Image: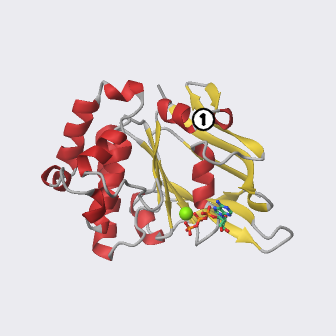
Amino acid sequence: MASRIVVENVDAGYGAVRVLHGVSIEVREGETVALLGTNGNGKSTLIKCIMGMVSPEAGRVFLETDGVRVDLTRKSTEEIVSLGIALVPEGRRLFPRLSVEENLLLGAYRRSARADITANLAFAYDAFPVLRSRKGQLAGSMSGGEQQMLAVARALMSSPRILLVDEPSVGLAPILVSRVIGKIKELKERRHLTVLMAEQNFNQATKIADRGYIERAGEEVLPRRVVAHAVHWRGPSSSKPHCSHAWK
Ligand SMILES: Nc1ncnc2c1ncn2[C@@H]1O[C@H](COP(=O)(O)OP(=O)(O)OP(=O)(O)O)[C@@H](O)[C@H]1O
Ligand SMILES: [Mg+2]
């Protein structure tokens, strides 16, 4: 089954504030796609539109599997998770007063994921040995890097095929940023994931992204007009991306 996410001409915002204007992106099976842009340009808003946490005012978000389109704009976040899409949210959103293991188990709340709890927990502890040795520790007392690893591991507890990661590098020292980004690449390969990652850290994101989009707020007409430019990299190792086409 080959699945891709298709975002078509999405307008979205909060009340009177329009954040996204006619944004279209596509994330194909097996790709790692970077969503780049500085503060406030709408990266999280776009990710929330895909997860059903923000309703687009116009446009559509689809999950297309073997040519069959499921309209995500009409689905709840729970339904979207059940379709195999998981989010590592900005700011990690852990339960600080619950243990590491309790946080992991909360990632497996959907019914279909419960059957895989034992295997997924074993995978999480294998992929992140620090989580095994700290499984009883309160999540809020873990270091920033450890908390980010926990947030990624928790998302994998729902057995996703598509992983959305919102700014994994925020607040981390450079050495930890490299480690977290490297871990996402490793997990992608081990679990055959498709990854969409929002990042401000251009250099780190382009290390693992096959290609990406840059969101930027335009000054013209609308105060929060976002133009998504498609930028393609020849491969993760090539350093200088070139623009191929753009949408407005
Ligand atoms: N719940 C909300 N209510 C009102 N405005 C919001 C809300 N969430 C975000 N915004 C506004 O929408 C715009 C885009 O925010 P968003 O969080 O999508 O940007 P971002 O690219 O993820 O930024 P950052 O890199 O800082 O995470 C910002 O101007 C922000 O203030
Ligand atoms: Mg954000």
For this view, does 191 lie left or right of residue 161?
A: left
Most foreground residue, 120 or 95: 95
Residue at 34 percent of width and 58 percent of height? 96
Q: Dot 1, how many residues are within 10 Å of its Cα: few (below 14), some (14-19), or many (20+)?
A: some
Residue occupying the far right of the picture: 221
Looking at the rendered structure, the secondary structure element under dot 1 is loop
Most foreground residue, 122 or 32: 122
Horizontal and vertical percent for residue 11? Answer: 76, 52
Horizontal and vertical percent for residue 129? Answer: 16, 52
Horizontal and vertical percent for residue 78? Answer: 52, 34
Residue occupying the far front of the picture: 97
Q: Quadrant of ligand 1?
A: bottom right
Work out whether 35 lies above or below 159.
Answer: below
Horizontal and vertical percent for residue 21? Answer: 76, 57
Residue at 63 percent of width and 35 percent of height? 72
Q: In which quadrant will I find the C terminus?
A: bottom right
Q: Quadrant of residue 115?
A: top left
Work out whether 200 lies above or below 56.
Answer: below
Residue at 54 percent of width and 31 percent of height? 79
Residue at the disc numbered 1: 76
Please give the count of numbered marks on the rendered protein: 1
For this view, does 222 lie left or right of residue 230?
A: right
Q: Quadrant of residue 173?
A: bottom left
Q: At label 1, which amino acid type do we have?
A: Ser
Work out whether 120 lies above or below 41.
Answer: above
Q: Quadrant of residue 174?
A: bottom left
Residue at 57 percent of width and 58 percent of height? 44
Q: Let me know if residue 179 appears in the view.
A: no
Work out whether 43 lies above or below 54.
Answer: below
